[in-house]
Image (spheres, helix red, strand yellow):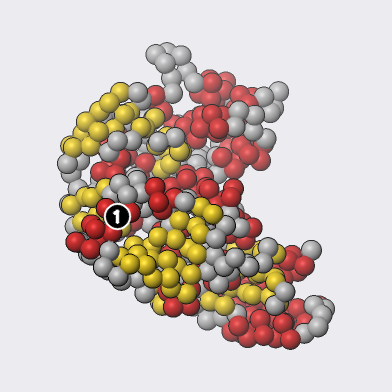
Amino acid sequence: MDFIAAHDLDEALAAKAHQPEAQLLAGGTDLMVEVNLAHHRPPSILSLRRVEELRELTPGRIGAGVTWARLERNGHRGLAQAARTVGSPQIRAAGTIGGNVATASPAGDGLPWIIAAEAAIEVKSRERGTRTIPWNEFFIGVKRTSLAADEIITAVVVPEDVPIAQEFAKVGTRNAMVISTVSCVVIRGDDGFRVALGSVATTPMRATRAEEMINAESTTSQSVLDEFARIVSEEVRPITDHRSTESYRRHAAGVLAKRLVERSLR
Amino acid sequence: MNVTITVNGEERVVDVAGHESLLNVLRNDLDLPGTKDACEQGECGSCTVIFDGESVCSCLVMAADADGSTVTTVEGLSVDTELHPVQEAMLAEGAVQCGFCTPGFVVSGSHLLETNPHPTEPEIREALSGNICRCTGYGAILRAFETVTGEGS
């Protein structure tokens, strides 16, 4: 095994340009599970743990190497709520938002917030410099992204005007250490509600039909909210797998979205 | 490749082959079997160590990536025969059944006290939420932590 520990971003980008096949390692909470249990043996590994530039955290720019433990304390409200539900304290001390974005699991806990906030993914390569990829062009399939082989995710870029009324919730089989069955983020701004969901499609998705419906209404009466929940349940595209069924996921998506809209109004 | 790790205050050099975890190196190369090997996927907390000041699962740290790091294992928490206050409290409360999860709880708990000397009960529960006891002896474990933090007295 070829192991490279980059000490700064230039070194990491040079290594990735030279060896685009190198597997990136950040917190290790996804990769090491593959190594330990699936006997995944990437021939070369590029560690980003020592790259200080990736750990910078401001409201407008979340470095890819920022851990869940830091986001839990210092993140935007909805993202902090999501961070709080990731794994366990041990996982949150190691796992990073950049790793969550790179893994691009449909169940990634940070991803619904990213798409509800209309954040972008900043990536860099030595040859082509920086690309800032809108969320809807970045996540393209189950664990598939538009990141090129020689690129490294450097940050999540958050729009300055992201509204502060944000709510996250997820459904799972227990309280700690759980991969979500359905997760949801609602952000309420002057332009209305934004609704994003995880674990209900191949990628995290916006419930655009439900957003249009509720944003066209002048009130949020019970009947409006019930119709809103029904449309959320209808437009999600879940599957049945070992964690849950399609019909339960549809039901839970509607319930969560409605509940979070109500919470965001309090 | 040679990896240098400061383990329990002592600088150790290990020849790491391939993709093995810090957990394996601690147990198999450094003769520190107190850190337990169970799920190998970060779910059970029995392999918890303090890694560069953070409480993490050592099964999810690639040993090659631990070069230059500082690690404290359960062996590093007691001095000769003098146990860590968390260990004393767990003994006193009978918070040890089969004992397999105990080192993980001790390390997580010592880290909690280091970062938050007077945690509330919800904070204790939260700090221990990444450690699983298959004997389900959580009541006694919580009581032990409450005595050591002053929460229960």
Asked whether A233 or A247 is in front, the reply is A233
- The amino acid pointed to by label 1 is Asp
Mark 1 belongs to chain? A
Asked whether B90 or A148 is in front, the reply is A148
The answer to whether residue A103 is left or right of residue B131 is left
The residue drawn where x is 48% and y is 73% is A135
Compared with A234, A13 (above or below) is above
Question: In the picture, residue A247 is in which quadrant?
Answer: bottom right
The residue drawn where x is 25% and y is 33% is B4
Pinpoint residue A257: horizontal percent, then vertical percent.
66, 72
Question: In the picture, residue B53 is in which quadrant?
Answer: top left
Can you name the residue that lies furthest to the top here? B81
Question: In the picture, residue A160 is in which quadrant?
Answer: bottom right
Pinpoint residue A108: horizontal percent, then vertical percent.
48, 64
Mark 1 highlights which residue?
A: A10
Asked whether B66 or B105 is in front, the reply is B66
Q: Quadrant of the C terminus of chain B?
A: top right
The residue drawn where x is 59% and y is 43% is B126
Kindly tell me whether residue B28 is visible in this rendering. Answer: no
